[in-house]
Image (tube, coloured by chain):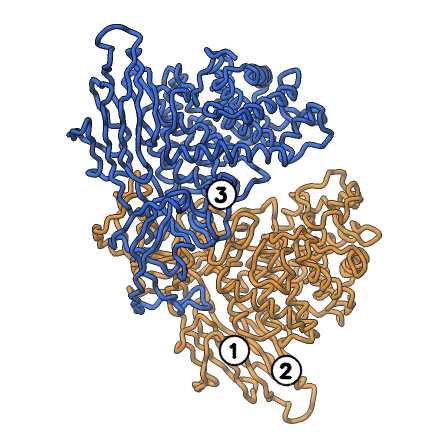
Chain colours: A blue, B orange
Amino acid sequence: MNKLDQNPVIVDTSQSPYARLKPISLSKISLDEGFWLDRYRINLKKTIPGQYRLLEQTGRLDNFRRVVGEVQKPFQGCVYNDSDVYKWLEAASWSLQYDQSEYLPALIDQTIELIVQAQDKDGYLNTYFSLDKIRERWTNITDKHELYCAGHLIQAAVAHHRVTGSYRLLNIAMHLADHIYMTFGPSQVEATPGHPEIELALIELYRTTYEPKYLKQAELFINRRGRGLVGGKEYYLDHVPFRDMNILAGHAVRALYLCSGAADLALETGETCLLDALDRLWNNLVNQQIYLTGGIGSRYEGETFGLPYELPNARAYAETCASIASLMLNWRMLQCQGKARYSDLMEWTLYNAVLPGISLDGNEYFYENPLKDDGNHRRQSWFECACCPPNISRTIAMFPGYLYSSSDEGIWLHIYTSSHADFEISTGQVVSIKQQTIYPWDGQISIEILDIASKSSDPQFINSAEFNLFLRIPAWVGNQDASLLINGKTIRQSIVPGSYLKIHRHWKPGDKIELNLAMKVQFIESHPSVLENIGRLAITRGPVCYCLEGIDNHDVQFTQIKINPIGGSEAEYIHELLSGIVRLSLAGKVMPLDRSWEGQLYKPYTHTRKYYRGRTIKLVAIPYYAWANRQPGEMEIWHQTL
Amino acid sequence: MNKLDQNPVIVDTSQSPYARLKPISLSKISLDEGFWLDRYRINLKKTIPGQYRLLEQTGRLDNFRRVVGEVQKPFQGCVYNDSDVYKWLEAASWSLQYDQSEYLPALIDQTIELIVQAQDKDGYLNTYFSLDKIRERWTNITDKHELYCAGHLIQAAVAHHRVTGSYRLLNIAMHLADHIYMTFGPSQVEATPGHPEIELALIELYRTTYEPKYLKQAELFINRRGRGLVGGKEYYLDHVPFRDMNILAGHAVRALYLCSGAADLALETGETCLLDALDRLWNNLVNQQIYLTGGIGSRYEGETFGLPYELPNARAYAETCASIASLMLNWRMLQCQGKARYSDLMEWTLYNAVLPGISLDGNEYFYENPLKDDGNHRRQSWFECACCPPNISRTIAMFPGYLYSSSDEGIWLHIYTSSHADFEISTGQVVSIKQQTIYPWDGQISIEILDIASKSSDPQFINSAEFNLFLRIPAWVGNQDASLLINGKTIRQSIVPGSYLKIHRHWKPGDKIELNLAMKVQFIESHPSVLENIGRLAITRGPVCYCLEGIDNHDVQFTQIKINPIGGSEAEYIHELLSGIVRLSLAGKVMPLDRSWEGQLYKPYTHTRKYYRGRTIKLVAIPYYAWANRQPGEMEIWHQTL
């Protein structure tokens, strides 16, 4: 293992010519005690080992042993099951950065050895097709997920290489990528995969190996869309060339993986057409296609986007993987443009669309994420199509990498959570900072310059550094609700929600920044074209979307409840509840059950009607991510209002 | 052809021990000029011949010729394509009752000869499995629709036999049914089909042949549900024994075909458990699962029922076949119990859920029937899965049979439309009546006793008959809005909407009944648990559900429109419009487009808001069944209200 080759960067845009921001290596970031370290530990101690056991129990590892000749069994499960092994391996590899055990490295090594042995001589690697189906290789790249699985192998290999410096798995990935280039490269078979993923993976491989053909191959796959090579269907994102797309349509995860790959390509090429298409699609996403939670892809049929504003609550599909894909896309857009709208959506998606996908104990998962439920939707320990569990796991494993960036202009703080990090700034100095907060429960964030180190002996670089600090001012904060103190003095700088606050200064060790984002309970309404939400309000506080759950609001049916948005609210942190949450109490009324509807679904409208005053009650709301961790009952995010 | 064997009754419950009502033979009923004769003629002259051409063009007839050895081609299309030929044949056979051409009988005869020759020696008949797949017969009755196709063959054969007296196709059906009994009968393979249909068909075959094993086999198939024989899944109605079902779930068409078969069984056996289950399911249907239109099965995924009150408008599935299945079930329940709630729903379903499934010119069809659309949902001339077109066609061909019933108590009028009919009453006298109305455009119905004939010479039976006339008083009529005159004199009898008005009298030829059902424009609201309809009203007039269509209400987006339910309305019959309709003009307002939502999907709620008065406009509504027959545009049934 060559330490020099270690560069544990989650998406390595450090050399990308069109990246405004540069990533920070995981080796320079540590989480400190707080919300996200808790999640990180559960991922490391419970989720990753638990998923390995399930890979074993469900035959996903035996599929490799079968190809290697260690077991005599037929292929088990779905055609894309290799990808779950690779995503687990990616999650485990990123985690190695922080793991001190012997257990995890051993599991990783033995899994890698299986993969190494399962590769065919020509570089092909897929346990479904190897052995008996070898003649069917690449005969149906629309539906058989070979390039999708290849993409996840490459991502795992890149992660493992960046964290450990090892070439063992990276060589396998390069051999496979070379085989793909020989098969689908210029002047070869003109094809593009049914499920995007290979594109972004190949670009990451290019960034690791500097081999330009990988970038070329990714571009070819993107350019070949919209020409009927995948049947011309919207579902496969083949209905129109990527650069001509105006609206997100088709399978949600596929669409956003494709966008992420296109964003990676744009980071390398700077191509305006690509960036314009990404801008249009991003605007369509946030203006017409996204749930309040950040959930994406509303339709069960085909796991697709619906029509604009088609956002049913109980029947929300909102696949956990689609939220993760949104996170991936927004991170790339953020690195490209440095705009807070992307990091705002990343943070919102993490709390309200990714975290709901996993139980608080780290052992059960949601595939679909409804915004309303009768108590029947419960997390499962695994799925036949198990894409979501290891996707959550690798996302949490990568999480520290999403906190910060650097650029020629300075240091960027995207996501607030207790942590410390080292940044090399343009002068060559290394700035160490420490961030302390109990975010997302409170908006007080204190940032301290711990140290400024320099290799130079020039006095101007000793114990002082001139750079900009870019602090994300979340879009959720009210216009007058954010304030800033430096070394105890209020800074009279205009603070604009939804932008980066740029603080230029000669910083010194011991400098203290106190950013205060007042976390108020907010009532949210939605665009009148979202039919189910007319007359309804949702509740948020800071970056957290709240819901009502039956267990906290018993003895009433949710159809009877109306919240009172001007009735005030109380927020209380309760350590013992749901791994520690801020619970909200809200004013509301319980309306009597309208008996006039018994035994009727429709009736003639009568203009005069009874006026019910209702009984005043206190409603209790919890963070949406924590729902379905106690006894089953009703849940809703959008509430009727007085 | 033996004329004595002709008994063209659409569902022959004439001997069923538990039928309160008895059907009237098609040979005793004629439609007169009016709404339904127009539809009947289009079905006969356009739809049935057009569908035959499509059966030919799409290889559905060639599939039979292939088995017969007339063509050398592989099987074409879906595994269940034989059923489309059979449903067409059923439609054509019922139509023979009124058809005077040589064209249709010749088509029918040549189709029957193909079917006769395609039957295997042992009675098996299915062009997908015959020849090369003969060893796969009955290996997957969960998904391969063999018993479903068999059911439709039997229904076609029964129809052809009842109308023509011919045994040619009936013998084929009996041979197939005998083969099924040998295969799945008592002590044989314990199986039940994935798609119900065979049950009701076998019972109709029993009613035609008096062979009890067909009834037994139907009962076996029904009794075997809920035991995991079809994988135990709700989709296949195998999650619970039929008699234990409380809620309609699973595939909507399958569920209602099964209910129809169970109702047929109950008509023969009188079994209380079956009737109780049917009552529960019917109540669940009308209280929680049905669209205002009578459309059924709200989910695209699996063509299934949703959860209670899950009735999205734009994403309504509401398959045309499911509405037809509802009609079938309600007819059987009506014959069993003689309650107006069933005939009310039949009439409503015919106008608002079956008729929308076909274009006014009789050539194009809807499979899904949304209650809101942006102009992209258009009728098609055919479908790969073409169940709906011939299902509509046979329904219209059977329509005259739904108008009347008789019973020991007298004569029943269910559906109002210009027609005349002969009834043999319990005294043996034959009563001829004539019904005249421009229903559904006006609620004046005049009924005249044309003649009373008797074989007896007893003077009390000459020119006079004592019997009850049961007139359906629709549920849609207001409590004080119905009146009755006999021979010009107002009858002071309590008239209860949603019930049969029983008029006992010594009737004489020339007696005239004038029933007047005031057709007022009504605004309808829906149960508050139907989330998309909160704050919205729909418009109905008589038995017709109305909608707004873009072409009549241009220059506004439907999101801007609010109707004013106390602003009055005008109804005008326009002969030239949409084959003749009553068009409604309604008071409404156009609200200005709310610019505050531009570029936003969610925003914080503010308690104070602008008050817009809006611009007063006249809104124009047309019957929902007539939508999408002109240029594409927005359509909606549920409107925002002032």
Q: List the residue tagged with mark 2.
A: B408
- Provide the chain ID for the residue under circle 1: B
| A459 w.r.t. B18: above or below | above
Task: Name the front one of labels 3 and 1.
Answer: 3
For residue A475, side relative to residue B513 (left or right)? left
Q: List the residue tagged with mark 1.
A: B500
N-terminal of the pair, mark 1 or mark 2, is 2
Give the percent coordinates (x, y) of residue B2: 78, 68
Res A464 → quadrant:
top left
10 Å neighbourhood of mark 1: few (<14), some, or many (≥20)? many
Q: What's the amino acid at mark 3?
A: Glu
Q: CA distance from mark 3 to mark 2?
A: 57 Å
| B277 w.r.t. A298: above or below | below
For residue A494, side relative to residue B598 (left or right)? left
Q: Are marks 3 and 2 in contact (CB under 8 Å)?
A: no
- Provide the chain ID for the residue under circle 3: A
Q: List the residue tagged with mark 3.
A: A368
Give the percent coordinates (x, y) of residue A331: 39, 27
The secondary structure type at the circle numbered 3 is loop
Q: Is residue B583 visible?
A: no
10 Å neighbourhood of mark 2: few (<14), some, or many (≥20)? few
Q: Residue furthest right?
A: B121
Q: What's the amino acid at mark 1?
A: Tyr
Between B240 and B264, the one nearer to me in the picture: B240
Between A197 and B549, the one nearer to me in the picture: A197
Give the percent coordinates (x, y) of residue B592: 25, 48
Residue B547's disc number? none
